[in-house]
Image: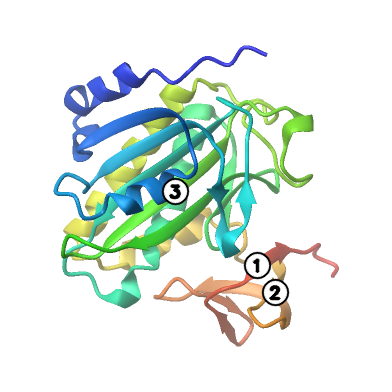
Amino acid sequence: MHRPPLDAEQLRRSLTESRELSFFSHIAVVESTGSTNADLIARAGEADADRAVLLAETQEQGRGRHARTWVSPPRAQIAMSVLVRLPGIEPAALGWLPLLTGVAVVDALRATAGVDANLKWPNDVLIDGRKVAGILAEVASGGGAPAIVVGIGLNVGLTEAELPVPHATSLTLAGAKVTDRTELVRSLLTEFARRFTAWRNAGWATTDLIGVYRDRCATLGAPVRAELPGGQTLEGIANDVDSAGRLCIGEHVVSAADVTHLRADY
């Protein structure tokens, strides 16, 4: 199966040709690496690391939440990480960065790929209830201001047989109108830069971001099962996210959990 490479030169030109993409300091594309997140974390102390973007045509040790690992055929996904510094932010607000990234991914896929994407709390991206993208944010040390590396893994050209789990999907399988990975990367980065800049200009306030997130989160209003750390399970209606980005299920507030959307007659 022919899968064209990312156009690294076009992406680098975008830094000077696009006002939105000038937000980023540089973009690098490598053929293979263990983890794009790990590579950028290792560079966090470098002077030019802020707003750096790293993409890999394939990852050998891609990581998700709870240290889960995954692999993908070369050039079938977008495996991308961004390092950003957040000077002056309150530690409690840092948890909104992966949620903001989820909003950016949803908006990019709706606008560019023409798919009806939405979010499952906290930041899984779904199409027709099947996961098409995941996001992992990790704290990096070095360089003064808080630094976070945000990784995005987006299934683009995977076939049904190549999906990592049965409840996953890809843009190709979802009938996306655009599956060119270079164009998708440009769209993802544009939406991320726009959302991040607005958040930074608002002094890291989440008032506007909360409303935007609620509009795109399919978990809200749905019956869910939350598997909590320690093995506990909670079921109920997910009715809101609070100012810290935590999920409200009935009278309970959840900050970390694996959430499953249940049928309405659960």
The quadrant where residue 261 appears: bottom right
**32 left or right of 258 in image:** left
Amino acid under label 1? Answer: Asp
Helix, strand or loop under label 1: strand
Helix, strand or loop under label 2: strand
Looking at the image, the residue that sits furthest to the right is: 265
Compared with residue 228, is residue 101 higher up or lower down, i.e. above or below? above
Tell me the residue at 46%/43% (across/down): 105
User: Does residue 222 appear in the picture of this structure?
Assistant: no
Of 188 and 217, the residue lying toward us: 188
Total labels drawn: 3
Marks 2/3: CA–CA distance: 23 Å
Amino acid under label 3? Answer: Gly
The quadrant where residue 209 appears: bottom left
Give the foreground label among 2 and 3: 3
Looking at the image, the residue that sits furthest to the top is: 2
Residue at numbered disc 3 = 151
Residue at numbered disc 2 = 227
Tell me the residue at 23%/39% (across/down): 24
Percent of width and height locating residue 8: 35, 21
> Of marks 1 and 3, which one's residue comes earlier in the chain?
3
Percent of width and height locating residue 126: 62, 47
Residue at numbered disc 1 = 258
Looking at the image, the residue that sits furthest to the bottom is: 251
Percent of width and height locating residue 64: 56, 55
